[in-house]
Image: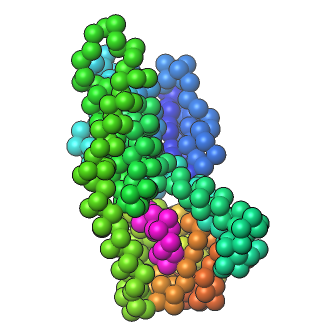
Amino acid sequence: MKKLLAVTGCPTGIAHTFMAAESLQQAAKAKGVSIKVETRGATGVENRITEEDIREAHAVIICSDVDAEEGRFQQIPVVKAALSEAIKNGPQVVEEALQKEPLQRQETAAETRESSSGESDQGKKGQHNAFYKHLMNGVSFMIPLVVAGGLIIALSFAFGGIHGAEQKESLAANLMKIGAEGAFALMVPILAGYIAYSIADRAGLAPGLVGGMLASSLGAGFLGGIAAGFMAGYIAKWIKDFLPLPKSMEKLKPVLIIPFLATLAVGLLMIYVVGTPVKALMDGLTAWLKSMGSANAAVLGLILGAMMAFDMGGPVNKAAYTFSVGLLGSDVYGPMAATMAAGMVPPLGLWLATLIARHKFTSEEREAGKAAGVLGLSFITEGAIPFAAADPLRVIPAMVSGSAVAGALAMGLGCTLRAPHGGVFILPIPHAVGNIGGFVLALATGMIVSGVLVVLLKKNVQKQEENTDGSS
């Protein structure tokens, strides 16, 4: 019996990671194939693949937007697929892995270096995906700091009001110190450090962290952190792979030469070349966002909302989410409110549709609708994916429309949000959501728009399916 391996991981590590794993497991079971899936979720690596697993495996499937340590799999065939592809078409992905021929040759030194550094060796497609993967790796490590910092700052307001942090040594002031001066201060350095780590492994971490710290101190914000992370990663990788040294000095490379040279280079580039223009760009963006009138804010919210529902957790969705999360560190909270409201709409809209038009859904879809409702309340947009995969031409436009309405209303009404995740469960936290009534109105309106459009667009299920459902 052929044995397969798989690695799944998404930036937030909450939904896509485990939905893809479950889809692959079910597909392998249906084909009578053994599969071990390593998940890289919010709590870390679970069910880690061992060297023995790799020796026994026929192929490995990598569905990960974060670092999957691909260098481990140099001696077996690798199939790469997007997380959404694994969720929608698990049997097809598994079949592709089963059709792979065993590798008949050893990797060359150049290929080994490329694979161990986290780069794809799958041709142009891998090269195009590299930027996204490295960025998402940084975002995945940054998000816990943003969540913790945002909620602790909200607690500071709850205990002391908006100006409570001005009272020195008070609980509110100390909570603000933890959230703003602790968690939020680390946000950009961690983003930069783990972008660099994804590119160059451990060699990139130190220069990435320093570059990110400089981006923060220079006022370049998350855009500066992204620039610092990529510079640090590729400079460290180049030094690691191509700087010739006498054999007696090779052992000094990882602990002395790479950290020193890469950190020096990134630091000088940030101070003299990159920092000032990126700071100007970030200042301009922040000022524009803070000065927007309700009409312009609504347009931005509409765009972010549509992006959140377009691919429900894919690259477009993550671009909108990353943009909104990054702005939290610059005290711009409106886009995050629009992004979360819009991201909750697709699964909630489908849940509503299954309630008001049961005749347009099979019994299985109606049960899936209940699960989608729970996922939607938790800001897990992926709950809508099974419906979108089954009927994309009708479901996706309906979801995009409702999410765009929710995003436009949230920003047009001046809603703000200090935490990047949590769904309705953060609503009771005082001051976590600004204009909570407007946020709930935006969410409800978007849900109704999506639900009604789905009902109008979808056809009735076949009578045969209805009769089967009635006799079961």
Would residue 94 appear left or right of 237 to someone viewing this image?
right
Q: Quadrant of the C terminus?
A: bottom right
Residue 258: say if magenta: no
Asked whether residue 458 appears in the rendered view, the answer is no
Image mark count: 0
Residue sitting at 48 percent across and 84 percent down? 411
Q: Is residue 96 left or right of residue 446?
A: left
Q: What residue do we see at 32% from left, 74% from top?
A: 284
The residue depicted at 66 percent of the width and 65 percent of the height is 176
Compared with residue 253, is residue 14 higher up or lower down, i.e. above or below? below
Q: Is residue 278 above or below residue 132?
A: below
The residue closer to the viewer here, 142 or 398, is 142
Residue 68 in the image: state x and y as whole percent. 46, 38
Query: Residue 392, image x and y in percent?
Result: 41, 70
Q: Main secondary structure of the magenta part?
A: helix
Tell me which corner region of the image, top left, top right, bottom left or bottom right, holds residue 193.
top left
Q: In which image quadrant can residue 98 be found?
A: top left
Residue 284 seen in the figure: yes
- In the image, residue 15 sits, relative to residue 411, either above or below, namely above
Q: Position of residue 175 (x, y in %)?
A: 70, 63
Q: Residue furthest top?
A: 248
At a point 40% along the width and 91% down the height, the residue shown is 293
Instruction: Name the one closer to the observer, 133 or 333.
Output: 333
Please indicate whether residue 242 sits to the left or right of residue 465 in the image. left
Rendered image coloring scheme: rainbow
* Residue range corresponding to the magenta coloring: 321-339
* Residue 442, placed above or below residue 23: below
Q: Where does residue 277 sit, x and y in percent of width and height?
A: 26, 61
